[in-house]
Image: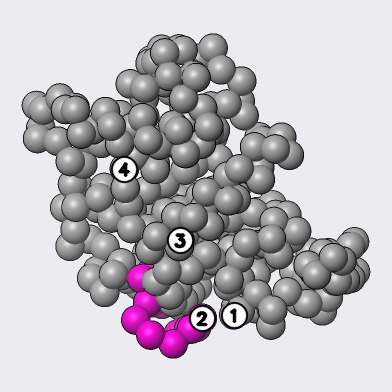
């Protein structure tokens, strides 16, 4: 078991084996990993490393061939769908939105775990949704149809929906992939604020500099294998990044922050 830090983990994967149906290669074989509560953990690696698959295994969108995933000390499969919805929020890299929701109505979908099966959002749910939009600075979009938004604007709305869900664990798959520089900084600050409030955040990225900006801990991945795991300051090195990307990478210190130069 690879333990990032001391203390009880919020997320623990034990002896995970996973293979996609119809593919000969096993992506994960005996993967064990613990992620501490109240941290920002980055899963960093090139395309095809297995980063998104790892998030989907944590959430339960994919099921391992063997092994177990524990969330807050309990096997994930022991949670009801409602309880899991209150515990874990997910921001996917791309999300298909089949209906022309208004932004507010879409963000209110994040309140589903708090409603009865036939219940409708109440005043408190609307308040939480409006607060999520305000925290992201997109309250002016509230009445717009979501299918009229740009890709970057939609990504912010998806994050607002996850924020309205009020999860204790937030999983983000390439959360800044479609954002301009200003909105990228806004999202990074929000993730830091949420973690300061007690949330555990895990995000995937192929951008080393994003990791250096906000991550407490790093999981380096290549070809379905974890190459290095630990505190950002210990793992984010020239040797480790060169091994991860298969090309020479130099880590330099600029204005008090580490950057990666290929």
**Where on the picture, by quarter, is residue 35?**
bottom left
Estimate the spatial distance between the alpha carbons at disc 3 and disc 2, rounded to whole Å: 17 Å
**Where on the picture, by quarter, is residue 178?**
top right
Crowdedness of circle 2 by 10 Å Cα count: few (<14), some, many (20+)?
A: some
Q: Nearer the viewer, residue 260 or 257?
A: 257
Residue 54 visible in the snapshot = no
Ranked by sequence position, the earlier of labels 4 and 3 is: 4
Secondary structure mostly seen in magenta is strand
Q: Which residue is mark 3?
A: 195
Estimate the spatial distance between the alpha carbons at disc 1 and disc 3, rounded to whole Å: 18 Å
Q: Which residue is mark 2?
A: 4
Instruction: Please state the horizontal and vertical placement of residue 70, each as a whole percent of the image.
Output: 31, 70
For label 2, the SS is: loop
Q: Mark 3 or mark 2, which is nearer to you?
A: 3
Q: In the rendered view, does 185 fall on the left or right side of 161?
A: right
Instruction: Please state the horizontal and vertical placement of residue 53, each as a whole percent of the image.
Output: 50, 54
Question: What is the span of residues highlighted in magenta in the rendered image?
Answer: 1-16
Instruction: Please state the horizontal and vertical placement of residue 181, each as a whole percent of the image.
Output: 73, 39
For label 3, the SS is: helix
Instruction: Give yes or no for residue 115 being in the magenta stretch.
Output: no
What residue is drawn where x is 32% and y is 52%? 167
Q: Which residue is mark 4?
A: 165
For label 1, the SS is: strand
Q: Are marks 1 and 2 in contact (CB under 8 Å)?
A: yes
| Residue 230, numbered label | 1
């Amino acid at each position: 078991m690879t333990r990032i830090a001391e203390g009880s983990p919020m997320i623990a994967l034990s002896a995970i084996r996973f293979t996609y149906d119809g593919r000969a290669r096993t992506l994960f074989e005996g993967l064990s990993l613990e992620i501490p509560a109240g941290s920002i953990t980055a899963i960093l690696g090139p395309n095809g490393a297995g980063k998104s698959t790892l998030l989907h295994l944590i959430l339960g969108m994919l099921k391992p061939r063997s092994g177990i995933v524990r969330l807050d000390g309990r096997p994930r499969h022991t949670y009801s769908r409602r309880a899991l919805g209150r515990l874990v929020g997910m921001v996917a890299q791309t999300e298909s939105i089949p209906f022309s929701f208004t932004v507010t109505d879409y963000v209110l979908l994040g309140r589903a775990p708090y409603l009865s099966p036939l219940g409708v959002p109440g005043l408190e749910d609307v308040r939480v949704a409006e607060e999520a939009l305000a925290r992201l600075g997109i309250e002016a979009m509230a009445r717009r149809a979501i299918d009229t938004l740009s890709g970057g604007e939609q990504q912010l709305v998806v994050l607002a929906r996850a924020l309205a869900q009020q999860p204790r664990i937030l999983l983000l798959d390439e959360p800044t992939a479609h954002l301009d520089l200003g909105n990228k900084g806004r999202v990074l600050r929000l993730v830091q604020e949420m973690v300061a409030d007690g949330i555990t955040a895990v995000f995937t990225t192929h951008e080393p500099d994003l990791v250096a900006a906000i991550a407490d801990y790093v999981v380096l991945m290549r070809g379905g294998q974890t190459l290095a795991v630990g505190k950002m300051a210990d793992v984010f090195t020239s040797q480790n990044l060169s091994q991860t990307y298969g090309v020479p990478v130099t880590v330099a210190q600029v204005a008090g922050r580490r950057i990666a130069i290929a």
